[in-house]
């Protein structure tokens, strides 16, 4: 029960990585707030946790909210609803996001703006509104979910990667500016994780490339991201600050890898 009675908001938690995080946090004693653009999905997810959207107090409590993180008014209403219900916010996991795989030469201004609007500006709106509430409450924990695509130049990751790189830098600035307010800020950069987003964004060639380039030769699971999120939102990580924790099966750090004579995706010899 490392997060006992902590009010924990995870955006985009109706499914995927966000749901795995809020499920683990609830198991650690947190009071779950599930917020998603899919409001019905958020309510269903809260029910799957065995929680009711009821009044504060006791372990039966929880909250399910519809929110569009790219809309500042919607974000402000979400934070106001949490404070009205629980009186405080202890944990934010800034997870809501959309994928994308459009080549650089083909990306339109609309797709660029939509991706940046949700994955970077939206994350900023949520972080700022949550941090303002945490300042009033005497502190908190914030984890931004970035991506390996924000650290390495992958095919089709122009808008997505730029947004995630921006969010990783924002994490560092937040860590510097919010330290005096006892708000601990870090980010998690997932590698390839098996979720609905990955099913949409990763075709067969992408999957083969990842499985070749990841030393552990497999995709990660949402639960493996959730374990890292619990650590970064618990007291155990109190001196970890402004850090990006890669959870990627070694993808970022890998150099030359011998693959038993297998041919690498794209035709190169493997070893
Ligand atoms: N799956 C991966 O391989 C992977 C890798 C690196 C990073 N990530 C990041 O992890 C996070 C979660 O990804 P996932 O794979 O679970 O995706 P997912 O598509 O399965 O889930 C994303 C959730 O966010 C919600 N959402 C989308 N737009 C929203 C908005 N404007 N406002 C509020 N909610 C919104 C969706 O409804 C959905 O429930 C994202 O930030 C993603 O960029 C995922």
Image (tube, grey):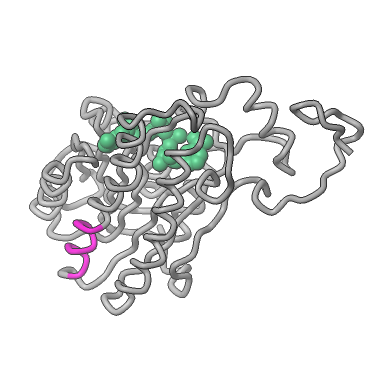
State the residue in front, 147 or 220. 147
Q: Is residue 183 left or right of residue 148?
A: left
Which image quadrant: the N terminus? bottom left
Q: Quadrant of residue 233?
A: bottom left
Q: Is residue 178 left or right of residue 133?
A: right
Residue 184: image location, x then y, percent: 36, 68
Above or below for 165 versus 39? below
Residue 209: image location, x then y, percent: 69, 31
State the residue in front, 38 or 174. 174
Q: Does the image show residue 136?
A: yes
Q: Is residue 74 left or right of residue 213?
A: left
Highlighted range, magenta: 128-135
Which image quadrant: the C terminus? top right
Residue 93: image location, x then y, percent: 35, 51
Residue at (49% x, 33% y) in the render: 104
Residue at (58% x, 44% y) in the render: 153
Residue 231: image location, x then y, percent: 48, 59
Q: Main secondary structure of the magenta part?
A: helix
Residue at (39% x, 56% y) in the render: 143
Residue 83 part of the magenta segment = no
Q: Is residue 4 left or right of residue 208?
A: left
């Amino acid at each position: 029960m490392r997060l006992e009675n902590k009010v924990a908001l995870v955006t985009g938690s109706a499914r995927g990585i966000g749901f795995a995080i809020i499920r683990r946090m609830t198991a650690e004693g947190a009071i779950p707030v599930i917020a998603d653009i899919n409001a019905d999905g958020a309510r269903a997810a809260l029910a799957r946790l065995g929680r009711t959207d009821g009044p504060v107090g006791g372990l039966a409590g929880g909250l399910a909210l519809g929110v569009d993180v790219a809309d500042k008014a919607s974000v402000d209403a979400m934070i106001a609803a949490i404070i009205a219900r629980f009186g405080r916010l202890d944990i934010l996991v800034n997870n809501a996001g959309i994928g994308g795989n459009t080549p650089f030469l083909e990306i339109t201004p609309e797709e660029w703006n939509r991706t940046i609007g949700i994955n970077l500006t939206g994350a900023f709106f949520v972080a700022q509104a949550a941090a303002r509430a945490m300042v009033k409450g005497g502190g908190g924990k914030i984890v931004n979910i970035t991506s390996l695509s924000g650290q390495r130049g992958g095919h089709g990751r122009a808008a997505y990667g730029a947004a995630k790189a921006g969010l990783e830098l924002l994490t560092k600035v937040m860590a510097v500016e919010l330290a005096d307010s006892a708000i601990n800020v870090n980010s998690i950069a997932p590698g390839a994780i098996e979720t609905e987003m990955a099913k949409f964004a990763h075709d067969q060639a992408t999957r083969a490339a990842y499985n070749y380039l990841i030393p552990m030769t497999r995709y990660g699971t949402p639960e493996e991201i959730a374990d890292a999120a619990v650590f970064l939102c618990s007291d155990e990580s109190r001196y970890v600050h402004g850090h990006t924790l890669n959870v990627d099966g070694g993808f970022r750090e890998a150099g030359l890898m011998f693959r038993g004579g297998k041919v690498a995706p794209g035709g190169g010899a493997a070893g």
